[in-house]
Image (cartoon, rainbow, N blue to C red):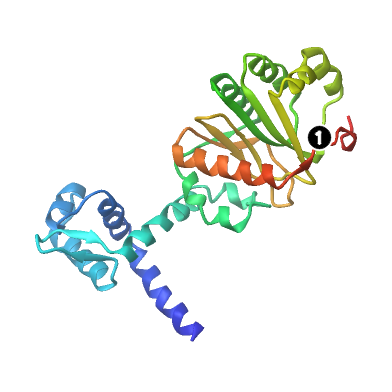
Amino acid sequence: MMADLIDETADYVLELASSQRLNILISLLNKELTPTAFAKEIDATKQEVHRNFLRLEKSGLIKKKVNGKYTLTTFGQTICTQVPSLVFLSQNRKYFEEHTLGDVPHKFQMRCGQLTNSQYVKGVSKVLEQWKQIYKNSDEYIYEILSEVPLDLIEPLVKKVKKGIKFNYVFSESAVVPKGRKALLKKLGFYELMEKGLIERKMEKNVQTVVVLNEKEACLMFPTLDGESDISEMFYSDDPMFHEWCLDYFRYSWYGSDVFRESKLKE
């Protein structure tokens, strides 16, 4: 029984193994089309396009309406929601040769297509610059899931919070804490901001995936294959779908975290 299901699924995967057929499906997400109109759009022969429309129709992915135009079936629409995940993973295949989705729950991995419209940033200096920019652009809040604290990010963060920005973060018990962190936090008035309720913090046993976001943009850093967090490379975007993924993941981590215990950290 399972073998039959796998064979049937393989047949559908074969139907997607064509850039033109994938293009047809994605195009039909936005509007109804005829094979002739689509052939003109992509500058392809009518015969080739017509053949691919018929294949997709036979597979139950699209259907022809009485006006002669094609539209996606429910099955086709659902298949299209999975395509962005393949796109994200394939376009970042080299990155994922050295990184893993780590401790990200399966339900979020299934949504990784939301991360497709993002910019890959490589290099610690470029990553930190983008990180600071997220602080700078915040008008309402800054949320973070952290495995370490780059010392030169503390001051610009505190300056922003002093202007009324809400700061919530989840910290790893095994975080890499720079020497002099506590003294710097005290000097900058960090603990007074906590008393005012502008800063809230919680703790996880081990953070692998790092997230930084404000109300309109976000960045995401996955761990290396050995499970170590890596802030030398990131994915950044102000795309609403990317932001939604990061915000949902932050909330999931926040509500699943424990009380923050300073005694767990060592400088």
Give the residue drawn at x 49%, y 41%: 242
Numbered label tally: 1
Tell me if 64 is positioned left or right of 62 in this view: left
Name the kind of residue labelled 1 in the image: Val
Residue 130 shows up from this direction? no
Which residue ends up furthest to the bottom in the rendered image? Answer: 1
Q: Which quarter shows the C terminus?
A: top right
> Quick check: 237 above or below 133?
below
Give the residue drawn at x 18%, y 49%: 43
Residue 195 image-quadrant placement: top right
Tell me if 108 is positioned left or right of 265 in this view: left
Give the residue drawn at x 67%, y 31%: 168
Q: Position of residue 93 (x, y in %)?
A: 54, 51
Tell me if 114 is positioned left or right of 155 in this view: left
> Quick check: 202 above or below 134?
below
Residue 169 image-quadrant placement: top right
> Quick check: 15 above or below 42?
below
Q: Residues within 10 Å of mark 1 (few under 14, many from 20)?
A: some
Check disc 1 and report the residue beneath it. Answer: 176
Tell me if 263 is positioned left or right of 143 in this view: right
- Label 1: state its secondary structure: strand
Which residue ends up furthest to the left in the rendered image? Answer: 67
Residue 161 image-quadrant placement: top right
Residue 263 shows up from this direction? yes
Q: Position of residue 51 (x, y in %)?
A: 19, 67
Which residue ends up furthest to the front in the rendered image? Answer: 196
Front residue of 111/176: it is 111
Q: Position of residue 98 (x, y in %)?
A: 65, 49
